[in-house]
Amino acid sequence: MTISIISFTRAGYELSKKIKKEIINTYSSYRVKLYVKCEALKKDTLNSDIEIENMDDEAGVDTYKFIYVDENIDEWAKGQFEDGTSIFFIGATGIAVRAIAGALNNKLKDSPVLVIDEKGEYIIPLLSGHMGGANELSKSIGRLIAAVPVITTATDKNNVWAVDVFAKQNKLEILNKAKIKEVTSRILEEKKINILIPKETEKKYQEEHFKIKDKLVISVYETEAFDSIEPLIDKAICEDVDVLITNRYYEINNEIIKAEDELKKLPLILCPKEYIIGIGCRKGKTKEEIEYAINDALKSNNLHLNQIAYIASIDIKKYEQGILDFAQKNKIEFLTFSAKELEEVSGSFEESEFVKEKTGIGNVCERAALKACTYDGALLQKKSKYSGITIAIAKRKWNLDF
């Protein structure tokens, strides 16, 4: 995860340095960039040895140098949103609100935005509290700097089950986000919620997972129609179901959800992210090159990025900027494994002596894709070669995770 912290005063900049230090000392996978929009600090850079920050791909971040923001703050924020970066504003909430207003696009995809006062006493998750993880970020960063998280989302304040958090935890794509509000409203009113889940799910639900204020108001039903869209065209079922989990992503997305009148009749639909991209690449491959290779592989298999649970590779690619940028932009978790872990993956793989010499393992993409399957999985597409990039796709066995 990349976090961009922007400050507007000297005091704000000093706090941003403290936050960065605490983050990089605690979370090795986090990258932090410091930005300032303060004329006085800009003048300091002209009369000192402070330089614009230069990120070290291998070591992560270990400096407190900053990048001065010359452009309008709203243009800066728009660029951060396009990159999928998490944003911390140190200053007034009003500044943050005005800065991000023009960048807002999709509540399920927008960047998490937090606001911290200059004294570091309070931290407010302003946007993307659940799906973007701003609420959890505010708690974890709050612990690091002794700041009080100010969380305002209704489900958190009432300590009740949140369907969007459930979807995120279980790698479920939300197809009709407008229905989240309806489901949440019923839960907050302590009305009964019916969820239809695939019968194939091995990890069984337990009633306590769906209790609200110690009262069971959610009923979970199993269906054998996991591989069919029949529940969606059965009005009787639709009337009784509030949340439907089904893996028929394309049939639903292409044939039903596009029709507005049909959309209103449907329950909230959650589709498991069943696929994993395994990737190997030469050092220095750009986000655009990675994007081309992955999109081409997906297109060949009639898949969409929204169906991808993870991108996986070997640990020496942990700081490969092109992969990191692509994963962050598309909100896909990037997993890496050691050569030893990948070597333990069983199967028949196309081995490369060159790759083995460089990485210690003869095939990265296929092994990484299978390793990330968690429960069980199989290769849907074996290694495909692009210019300095290899891609494999595995289909995993999806399970509920509480």
Image: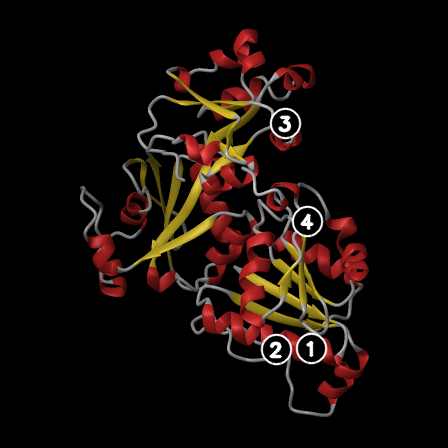
Question: Residue 321, percent across and down?
Answer: 48, 62
Q: CA distance from mark 4 to mark 3?
A: 18 Å
In this rendering, does residue 131 appear at all?
yes
**Which residue matches tag 4?**
152
Q: CA distance from mark 4 to mark 2?
A: 27 Å
Crowd rating for badge 3 (residues with CA inside 10 Å; few <14, some 14–19, many 20+): some
Question: Residue 169, percent across and down?
Answer: 46, 42
Mark toward the viewer: 4 or 1: 4
**Which residue matches tag 1?**
13
Q: CA distance from mark 4 to mark 1?
A: 27 Å
In this rendering, does residue 53 appear at all?
no
Q: Which mark is residue 171?
A: none
Q: Which mark is residue 186?
A: 3
Crowd rating for badge 2 (residues with CA inside 10 Å; few <14, some 14–19, many 20+): some
Question: Residue 285, percent across and down?
Answer: 46, 59
**Which residue matches tag 2?**
17
- Position of the C terminus, as image quadrant, is top left
- Amino acid type, residue under disc 4 in the picture: Thr
Q: Is residue 83 above or below residue 201?
A: below
- Amino acid type, residue under disc 3 in the picture: Arg
Upstream in sequence: badge 4 or badge 2: 2
Q: Is residue 113 above or below residue 395?
A: below
